């Protein structure tokens, strides 16, 4: 993955799971939350939430901060920003390619009209 690297690979792999995407949505809305509070909002166990949070943490999407006996998690947007920039560059490249195809097709169509 040119320009994306391992960070983008990790983010895309982490975001492939709908439960992890939902966890990010919940954390983005709340600012921070514990695994227990997050599990209350999902149809999975607290232990499953902790495992999903570990994947998100490894991808750089969330971070945990110990406050007393609780571990509070929050979104870390930097990894998402890197991935969004990679995706935008990829989309721009495809837009350039499609524009070139369009120009070639329009030129061929114009040339065909001139021949008639």
Image (cartoon, rainbow, N blue to C red):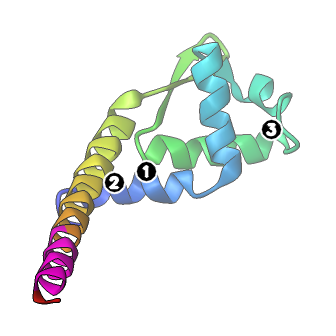
Residue 69, horizontal then vertical, whole percent? 67, 16
Q: Earlier in the sequence, mark 2 or mark 3?
A: 2
Q: Which residue shows up at 49% across the image and 59% down it?
A: 13
Judge by depth and name the residue closer to the eye, 67 or 45. 45
Query: Residue 49's spot in the image, x, y percent?
Result: 72, 41
| Residue highlighted by disc 1 | 11
Nearer to us: label 2 or label 3: 2
The secondary element bearing badge 3 is classed as: helix
Q: Which mark is residue 46?
A: 3
Residue that appears at 79% across and 27% down? 36
Magenta part, dominant SS: helix
- For residue 80, side relative to residue 57 (left or right): left
Which mark is drawn over residue 8? Answer: 2
Instruction: Give yes or no for contact between labels 1 and 2 (Cβ–Cβ under 8 Å).
Output: yes
Query: What quarter of the picture does the N terminus occupy?
Result: bottom left
Whole-number angstrom distance, CA of label 2 to CA of label 3: 27 Å
Q: Could you tell which of marks 3 and 1 lies nearer the N-terminus?
A: 1
User: Which of the two residues, 37 or 19, is positioned nearer the viewer here?
Assistant: 19
Task: Find the residue positioned furthest to the top.
Answer: 68
Extent of the magenta region: 103-114
2 in relation to 42, above or below:
below
CA separation in Å, label 1 and label 2: 5 Å
Q: Residue furthest bottom?
A: 115
Q: Tell me where residue 35 sits by quadrant.
A: top right
- Is residue 109 found inside the magenta-colored segment of the image? yes
User: Label 2's element?
Assistant: helix
- Residue 38 at what x, y percent from top left? 75, 28
């Amino acid at each position: 993955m040119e320009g994306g690297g391992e960070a983008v690979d990790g983010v895309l792999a982490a975001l492939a799971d709908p439960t992890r995407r939902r966890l990010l949505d919940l954390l983005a809305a709340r600012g921070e939350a514990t695994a227990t509070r997050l599990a209350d909002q999902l149809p999975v166990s607290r232990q499953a939430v902790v495992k999903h949070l570990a994947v998100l943490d490894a991808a750089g999407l969330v971070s945990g901060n110990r406050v007393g006996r609780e571990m509070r998690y929050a979104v870390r947007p930097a990894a998402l920003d890197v991935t969004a920039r990679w995706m935008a560059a990829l989309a721009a490249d495809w837009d350039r390619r499609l524009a070139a195809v369009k120009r070639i097709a329009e030129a061929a169509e114009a040339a065909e009209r001139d021949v008639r």
